[in-house]
Amino acid sequence: MSEQDIASLLRAHGVPPTAQRLAVAEYVLATEDHPSADEVLARAKERLPMLSRATVYNTLHLLVDKGLLTELTVAGGRIVYDCNITPHHHFIDEQTGLVHDIPFEALRVTKNEPLSGYDIREITVIMRGRKKGRGRH
Amino acid sequence: MSEQDIASLLRAHGVPPTAQRLAVAEYVLATEDHPSADEVLARAKERLPMLSRATVYNTLHLLVDKGLLTELTVAGGRIVYDCNITPHHHFIDEQTGLVHDIPFEALRVTKNEPLSGYDIREITVIMRGRKKGRGRH
DNA sequence: GTTCGTGCAAACGGTTTGCAACAAT
DNA sequence: ATTGTTGCAAACCGTTTGCACGAAC
């Protein structure tokens, strides 16, 4: 995704693209990692060394707000960002702590009991375990 | 669960029961709330006003360590404790932020695709939505 | 007298806030 | 001129740590 595309994407969501926002968005909207705010800061600083921490937080919240980014919280209270905004599940590697996306269609959740009393808006499955070797990702 | 029972439970897990630990355990091991450390402190202080914050954290970690308590992290990075140590799912009320336990047997998760490459040790379903009125809890 | 548990206060790390400077319109 | 964006530093909050006192064996 080119810097131009990112810029129009931002504009399309009512976010005026600035140099700082581009530096943040260009990384966080494209990566398959699930970076923390700090990791985003580090990466974006490579392109824009003068970028401040507060601006990164501003931008991340803005992107989450505009629906371009998902904030998720993993065990231990770590907050992490996921540019995959379609519904999907997560696998957390217990050894590395890394989060992997699992396509929504890979699993099916069915109710054995009616679960009346709950108006369910969203279902996410979180799996934990070890990712078996062979290859990266 | 009486104070005596809690005491033997702790002993059975190699945790010498002290007044402070009893004050913490008596609440946190019995409640259906999913309290934060701070809420546990507040509640336990009602019984033992002189209880310190550090001791609560010590005790909570100890209980988690001994398998008597589960630590879980909900959206926003909030860390919360759940005395239900059997596998189960969660429903999070978007309005109140409250966490409700859903029996493990209430749902079934099946794989549409094989998901090879992942050695799955644990599956939890997190549902979000609104809890419909009628009654408390 | 050694170990373990506790309380206190300080430190910590990630996040948020307040504010002044600046840019864009 | 008003509005929106940024950088900085300070404040903040929940958690962790270091240390000294006290109790238990």
Image (spheres, coloured by chain):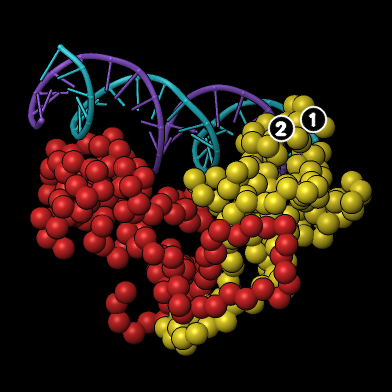
Chain colours: A yellow, B red, C cyan, D purple
Labels 1 and 2 touching (C-beta < 8 A): yes
Q: Nearer the viewer, residue C17 or A88?
A: A88
Q: Nearer the viewer, residue C12 or B66?
A: B66
For label 1, count other residues whose C-alpha is less than 10 Å away and answer few (under 14), some (14-19) or many (20+): few
The residue pinned by badge 2 equals: A42
Q: Quadrant of residue A97?
A: top right
Q: Which chain letter matches label 2?
A: A
Q: Quadrant of residue A78?
A: top right
Q: Is residue B79 left or right of residue B68?
A: right
Task: Work out whether residue A85 can be spotted.
Answer: no
Q: Amino acid at mark 1?
A: Glu
Number of the label disc, if any, that sits on residue A129? none
Residue A88 percent across, percent down from the top left? 68, 66
Task: Work out whether residue B117 can be spotted.
Answer: yes
Q: Nearer the viewer, residue B131 or A103?
A: A103
* Badge 1 element: helix
Residue located at (75% from left, 27% from top): A50
Q: Amino acid at mark 2?
A: Ala
Are the residues flagged by discs 1 and 2 from a single subunit?
Answer: yes
Residue located at (67% from left, 73% from top): B111
Residue D22 percent across, percent down from the top left? 9, 23
Is B25 rendered above or below residue B61?
below
Q: Is residue A26 left or right of residue A93?
A: right
Q: Which chain letter matches label 1?
A: A
Residue A13 percent across, percent down from the top left? 77, 60
Residue located at (65% from left, 46% from top): A98
The residue pinned by badge 1 equals: A46
